[in-house]
Amino acid sequence: MKSIGEIFKESRKAKNITVNDVARSTKIKTSFVQLIEEGGWNNLPNYSVLSGFIKNIASYLELDVAKSHAIFKRDYLPQKPYINPRKDVSKKFIWNPKFTFVLLSGLLFVVITGYLIFQYRKSTSPPELIVNSPTQGQVVKAGSVVVSGTVTSDATVTANNQPIIVNDGYFEGKVFVTMKTTQIEVVAKTRTGNKTSVTHMIEVN
């Protein structure tokens, strides 16, 4: 059974017509006419365009247009579209307003979360306390002794249950002592009730 391309080719040659003659008269590219005769469907335009080509060529060669088109439909084997079996994940990154919003929201969340964690730890941690005076084992005179040091700024300080003034993390004050006093206990306390104490032994004479 002859293909439509073979039928066109035989009819053209029988009428002593060249491929160029067909192309010029039908306004179809010469290469397309040749491909139709050879059945090279995969290198030709889509089906609807080819249908028009077949009808024009059949009419020019004085062949039965309807029959020629029916044979073409039988012969036509379009190229199957290529389907990539793997999804293309190499998409180009584009900075857009949505990404900016998500990024800023994430940064804000991290900052707020970090601040809350810091405040929680600060509120639940005992205050830092360093006693500079009196030193451990210091000999002092009866009456009063200077107590000083550094502490967490929001803490209150007492020495042997006597309040000491705190100024921006530094405390200093005088504490009454007698011959029976053997130690100075400094206690720092935060507003949440956390405490730190330091005890220095002293000798009163």
Image (cartoon, rainbow, N blue to C red):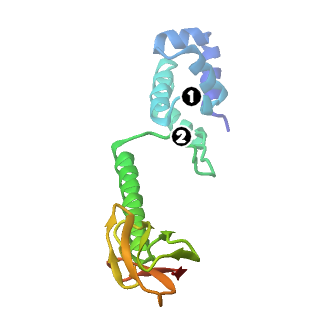
Q: How many marks?
A: 2
* Residues tagged 1 and 2 counted as in contact (Cβ below 8 A): no
**What residue is shown at x 42% (from left), y 59% (from top)?**
110
Answer above or below: position of 71 versus 186: above
Given residues 67 and 205, the one toward you in this image is 205
Label 2 packing within 10 angstroms: few (<14), some (14-19), many (20+) = few
Would residue 64 be visible to someone looking at this image? no
Instruction: Give the residue type that dot 1 points to.
Output: Leu
Compared across the picture, whether 125 is left or right of 43 comes to left
On-image quarter of the N terminus: top right
Q: Residue furthest bottom?
A: 180
For residue 32, side relative to residue 166 (left or right): right
Q: Position of residue 183 (x, y in %)?
A: 50, 84
User: 120 and 54: which one is in front?
Assistant: 120
> Please, what is the three-letter code of the amino acid marked with disc 2?
Lys
Q: Quadrant of residue 194?
A: bottom left
Report the Cα–Cα distance between label 1 and label 2. 14 Å
Residue occupying the point 47% across, 32% down = 51
Percent across and percent down for residue 113 are 40, 65
Note whether 136 is above or below 111 in the view shown. below
Report the residue marked by disc 2.
73
Where residue 188 sits in the image (x, y, percent)?
41, 77
Tell me which residue sits at (34%, 60%) in the image. Answer: 168
Element on which disc 1 rests: loop
Q: Which residue is mark 1?
A: 44
